[in-house]
Amino acid sequence: MMVVVAIVALIVGISFPAASAGLDSVRMVSACDSVATFLNAGVNHAERRQQPVELVISPREGRLNLYSNEPGFARELTMPDGVVVEAVLPAIEGADAAEPRRVLFLPGATVPGIAIQLGNRRNAHRRIRLDPMTGFPRVESVASQ
């Protein structure tokens, strides 16, 4: 009985880091897809309703919010555990990177060329960039810093 318990404990001990890394990877992919969908929803809402939409990115809280003049329209996206908003690019000179950043999506106007960089505990980095030409977000891998 002791030998069986020792073997099971050994197998669990060996496989835990791989399972943990897999979960972190899934969380990062899920967060990137969620941010891309969230940004796309903001751009689409501005165009379809012909109303400005404000995007507020709060790196410290790991949260994104969308607001509009339309009554009842407010959306929130919170990053999953282990995934943080590292930066909003392009950085504003002299501004605190941890403070909330506000971006407007205006109907009929060019989409702002911003990027949101996410990171996780395993030092993986991804950037979700809004393409000003098409208005669609795209996810890019970022080399470790």
Image (spheres, grey):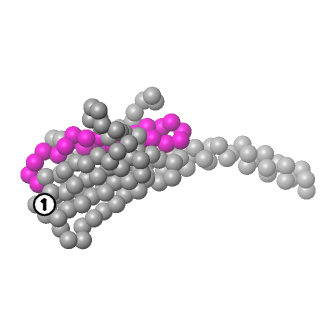
- Kind of residue indicated by mark 1: Gln
Please provide percent x and percent y for residue 128.
33, 43
The residue at the point 85 percent across, 53 percent down is 5
The answer to whether residue 37 is visible is no
Left or right position of 3 against 102:
right
The answer to whether residue 62 is visible is yes
Please provide percent x and percent y for residue 41.
25, 57
**Helix, strand or loop at disc 1?**
loop
Q: Quadrant of the N terminus?
A: bottom right
The residue at the point 22 percent across, 48 percent down is 103
Answer few, some or many: residues within 10 Å of disc 1's Cα (few below 14, many 20 plus, some between 14 and 19).
Answer: some
Residue wearing tag 1? 51
In this picture, is 9 found above or below 49?
Answer: above
Please provide percent x and percent y for residue 47.
13, 57
The residue at the point 24 percent across, 60 percent down is 67
State yes or no: residue 12 in magenta: no
Q: Quadrant of the C terminus?
A: top left
Q: Which residues are magenta?
A: 107-131
The residue at the point 34 percent across, 60 percent down is 76
- Pick whichever, 110 or 13, lies toward us: 110
Please provide percent x and percent y for residue 53.
19, 57
